[in-house]
Amino acid sequence: MPIIESEYKPPFWAKKSFVSTVFSGLARQVKGVEQSRERIDLPDGDFLDLDWSLSTAKSRKVIILLHGLEGNAQRPYITGSAKLFNDNGIDACAVNFRGCSGESNRLYRSYHSGATEDLEAVVTHILSKNQYEDIYIKGISLGANMALKYAGERNDVPTELKGIVAVSTPCDLRGSCGELLSLKNKHYAIRFLDHLKKKLKPKLNQFPDRLTINDYNAIRSLIDFDHIYTARAHGFTDAYDYYAKASCLQFLPNIKISSLIINALNDSFLSAECYPVKEAKHNAKLYLEMPKYGGHVGFVDKGNIYYNERRALEFVNK
C-alpha cells in the first residue's frame, strides 16, 4: 500500500523524542480500567497471565494487547488502549509475557521478541471461548515485532483475526539493538539491562546447571544479555542468530491481513531498517505511517488519549 501521510501533531513540548518517550513511560497515568486476571497454562508447562477488561455491553470483538521489553499489562500504553477500546464496545485482553506479571515463570526460558508460540497460545485460548467473531492484535515495541512476525510467518492465521496494529516496531532487531547501544540511548539501555538482570538473578539458584555466576557477571550490556541468556535459553546460536530469526522484517511480505505499522521518524530506538517502506509498497495489506514526532511510544495527544490509540481504534473500525 502507499505510505500513509500522518496527521499527528503533538503539543509543542512533546516534539523532542526524549521528552515524549520519558513522559509517556514514567509520568503518564491512566485511570478507570478494571482488569481481571486469568492464568492459562502453556504446552511446555509454563503459564501466562492475561488481564481482561471488558466493555459495558456484551462484545463480539476483542483486542489482544502486547507490551514491550520489561513491560506488563498495567503500563499506561496498555491500559490507555484498553480503556479506549472498552469505551468503544470492544473487550481487551492484555497479555503479560512470561515472568512479567509480578511472579517468576516456572521454566528457565522466558519471553523474547519472536516468541510467537506464546501469542498463538493466547489466540487459541480466546478462540476456545467461542464468544468473539473478530479478534485484533495491538503490539507495542517488542510486542509489535511479535505480532507482525506471527501474522507473516504462517499461512494458517485464524479467520477471526481481522487486523494488527504495531507501534514503535523494531522490525530489524539487530539494527534496533545497535541504536540502543549507542551513546544517545545509554540511559535507556542501562535501565533495561538493570530490569533484565534483576529478573534473571533468581534463576541462578533455580537453574544452577544452566546459569553460573560467571555467566551472570559477564552480562554488561544488552547484547551480552542476548548472547548469554536469550539465545541459549531459547535455542538460538547467539544474539545475532536470535536477531536474524526473530525480526519481523523478513515476514512482512507474507502478511495477508490488514496491518498498520506506526513508527515515528524521531524514534531513537529504531534503525533505518525499521522503516519498511519497500515492504509496505509491495503488500496491499501492509500500511506504514511514519509521523515526524512521537519518539518511542510517545504519541502524546489531547485528553490523555494517545495518537496511536486513536489510530488503532480507527483502523479496527474502518
Image: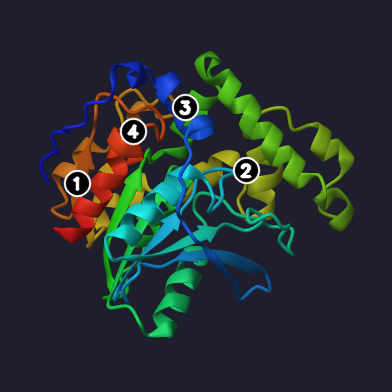
Q: Secondary structure at mark 1?
A: strand
Marks 1 and 4, the one that precedes in the sequence: 1
Q: Secondary structure at mark 2?
A: loop
Disc 1 target residue: 287
- Please name which of the two marks, 4 or 2, marks the residue nearer to the observer: 4
Q: Is residue 126 above or below residue 196?
A: below
The answer to whether residue 50 is left or right of residue 58 is right
Q: Label 3, label 2: how many angstroms apart (C-alpha)?
A: 34 Å
- Please name which of the two marks, 1 or 2, marks the residue nearer to the observer: 1
> As rendered, which of 73 and 123 lies closer to the eye?
73
- Contact, mark 1 vs mark 2 (Cβ under 8 Å): no
Q: Is residue 228 above or below residue 44?
A: above
Q: Label 1, label 4: how many angstroms apart (C-alpha)?
A: 18 Å
Counting from the top left corner in percent of width and height, residue 24 is at 45, 32
Counting from the top left corner in percent of width and height, residue 169 is at 38, 41
Residue that protrudes farthest toward the top in the picture: 183
**Picture quarter with the C terminus:** bottom left
Q: Label 1, label 2: how many angstroms apart (C-alpha)?
A: 32 Å
- Contact, mark 3 vs mark 4 (Cβ under 8 Å): no
Disc 4 target residue: 299
Amino acid type at mark 1: Tyr
